[in-house]
Every structure is written in C-alpha cells, then in structure tokens.
Image (cartoon, rainbow, N blue to C red):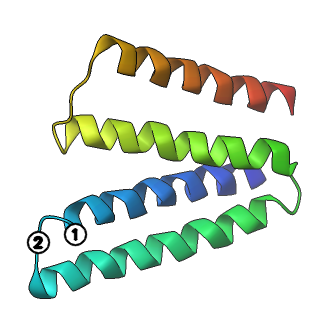
C-alpha cells in the first residue's frame, strides 16, 4: 500500500509541474486557476511523500519520488509541450527508470 501512496505522490509531482507549465503561458483568472492546481498538487504530493516515509526507507522513497516526477515531467514536456525528444534525452530517461526499478527491487 505504501508503494502505491509513493507512486501517487510522484504522479502529483508531475501534476504540479504540468500546472506550472500551463500557468506560464496564461494571464488573469486562468493563471490563478493553474496556480491553484499547482498548490493543490504540491500539497498532495508532499503529504503523500511524508506518509510513504513512515514505513519505507527515506533513501528509497525520495529518489523514487523525484524519479517519477522527473520522468513524468519530461514525458509531459515531450508529448504536451512539444519539447525535443533527442536520443540522449530518452536514453537518460530510460536509465533513470531502470534505477527506480532497481531501488524498488532492493528495498
């Protein structure tokens, strides 16, 4: 169950970076809406991260959380914000995913 909480925390991290990306291109009431989403996902991510650390080792939880956030954010950038998907960028994302899987296997 705590691994599920950790995964949801990582997805919330992707959520707050997505909202931040959307907020940079709008103004007015729409900006406030995206900032509200950013704050919601940030708080949810931090609360779930703290919950996951209650039963999983911090040395595993934090890298997995940041890894999920990093991979998710890069994928959002590529597929939604049309950022470049070069060979080396994808290569290092896949090595990051392999590292996250390795941490899960070892803990």
Q: Judge whether residue 1 can be spotted in this image.
A: no
Relative placement, left or right, of 42 versus 75 is right
> Residue at horizontal 57%, vertical 56%?
8
Residue 96 percent coordinates (x, y): 57, 26
SS for dot 1: helix
Q: State the quadrant of the C terminus.
A: top right
In this picture, residue 102 sits left or right of residue 80: right
**Left or right of residue 57: residue 34:** left
For the residues labelled 2 and 1, say whether their Cβ atoms are less than 8 Å apart: yes
Residue depicted at 73% across the width and 23% down the height: 102
Task: State the mark number for residue 60.
Answer: none
- Relative to 93, say whether 8 is above or below: below
Q: How many marks?
A: 2
- Cα distance between the residues tagged 2 and 1: 6 Å
Which residue shows up at 61% across the image and 20% down it? 98
Crowding at mark 1 (Cα within 10 Å: few <14, some 14-19, many 20+): many
Q: Nearer the viewer, residue 25 or 80?
A: 25
In what element is the residue under mark 2? loop
- Quarter of the image holding residue 106? top right
Q: Position of residue 32 (x, y in %)?
A: 23, 85
Residue 26: mark in rendering: 2
**Position of residue 10 measured from the top left corner of the image (x, y, whole percent):** 56, 52
**Percent x, y of residue 44:** 56, 72
Q: Is residue 96 above or below residue 13?
A: above
- For disc 2, the neighbor class at 10 Å (few under 14, some 14 to 19, many from 20) is few
* Disc on res. 23: 1
Tell me: residue 33, above or below residue 71: below
- Asked if residue 79 shows in the view, the reply is yes
């Amino acid at each position: 169950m705590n691994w599920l909480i950790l995964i949801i925390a990582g997805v919330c991290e992707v959520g707050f970076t997505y909202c931040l990306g959307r907020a940079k291109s709008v103004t007015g009431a729409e900006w406030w809406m995206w900032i509200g989403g950013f704050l919601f996902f940030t708080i949810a991510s931090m609360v779930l991260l703290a919950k996951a650390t209650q039963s999983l080792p911090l040395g595993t939880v934090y890298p997995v959380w940041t890894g999920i956030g990093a991979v998710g954010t890069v994928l959002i950038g590529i597929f939604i914000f049309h950022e470049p998907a070069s060979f080396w960028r994808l290569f290092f994302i896949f090595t990051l995913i392999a590292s996250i899987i390795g941490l899960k296997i070892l803990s």
